[in-house]
Image (spheres, rainbow, N blue to C red):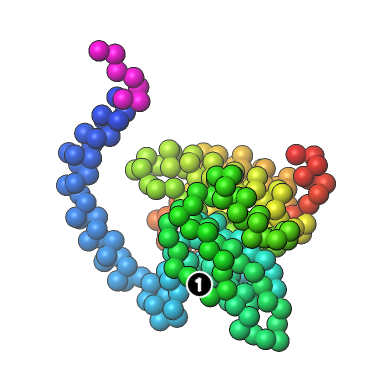
Amino acid sequence: MNITCFQRAKIFCRFCYQNFGQRHKGTSSQKWLQRQQKDPYVKRAREENWRCRSAFKLIEIDDKYKLLRPGEFVIDIGAAPGSWTQVACQRTNAAGLERRLPKGKVISIDLLPIVKVPGAEIIDCTDFTSRECQDKIIQLSTGRKADVILSDMAPNASGFKELDGGVLVSLVSNVLRFAVNQLAEGGAVVVKLWQGAGCDELGNAMQTLFDSVKIVKPRASRSDSREIYYVCQKFKGLETRQDS
């Protein structure tokens, strides 16, 4: 019987999981719990009512680059559990809590469920890369272009770094293609990538679309994590769209 490469890979992955994955599952879970208990950002997130520690990554980025302002329209991709959405809603005044300031707008998208965030319009249990999801975002945008597009999106880890990194590059490429048509001139994009193959090429593409592209590693990003954030500002707008 002929076995395809895909079938051989599937058999190999199943063998590895059965013989090695289960054995280390309990140990890795314990290490994760221990790290969470010692993590100061986890403690602060609980004390300050953020849904998870990743809120502090966006807070640090925004404090430095001043991306989120009252009255702005933000699209948050890969939003679950909602901590970046919380920050975006607070800083754009999306819930209208500050009556003297302009009221912003936030749309949040994820494959996973997202518990309601005051001020945000939620599109959950939906694949951002699908045409249906993007059409829904455009519908909720009511003709307005986004001032800021955020993506803390990441694929489910397979255990193979190069494979996972390639999938994330593909996801971020989808975000950039969406941004070309749905981002206001002068707008900003923040995306997460994992250091590795494809990052430089994607960074070069960002340089053609934005006047400013910075690579940031927030303090809240764990030192052993490969994640980096590209902060892209001053979108070049219609001229770039016509040339692309």
Kind of residue at badge 1: Val
Q: Is 68 positioned to the left or the right of 151 in the image?
A: right
**Hey, which quadrant is residue 185 in on the image?**
bottom right
**Hey, which quadrant is residue 7 in on the image?**
top left
Is residue 77 among what the camera can see?
yes
Q: Which residue is mark 1?
A: 117
**Residue 110 sits above or below residue 8 on the image:** below
**Residue 204 sits above or below residue 115 on the image:** above
SS category of the residue bearing label 1:
loop
Q: Which residues are magenta?
A: 1-7
Quadrant where the image shows the C terminus: top right
x and y percent of residue 98 in the render? 64, 85
**Residue 207 sits above or below residue 141 on the image:** above
Is residue 69 among what the camera can see?
no
**Magenta residue check for 5:** yes
x and y percent of residue 54 in the render? 46, 66
Give whichever of 115, 62 is nearer the camera: 115
Give whichever of 174, 193 is nearer the camera: 174
Query: Which residue is painted at 52% across and 59% down in the image?
Result: 123
x and y percent of residue 65 in the render? 66, 67
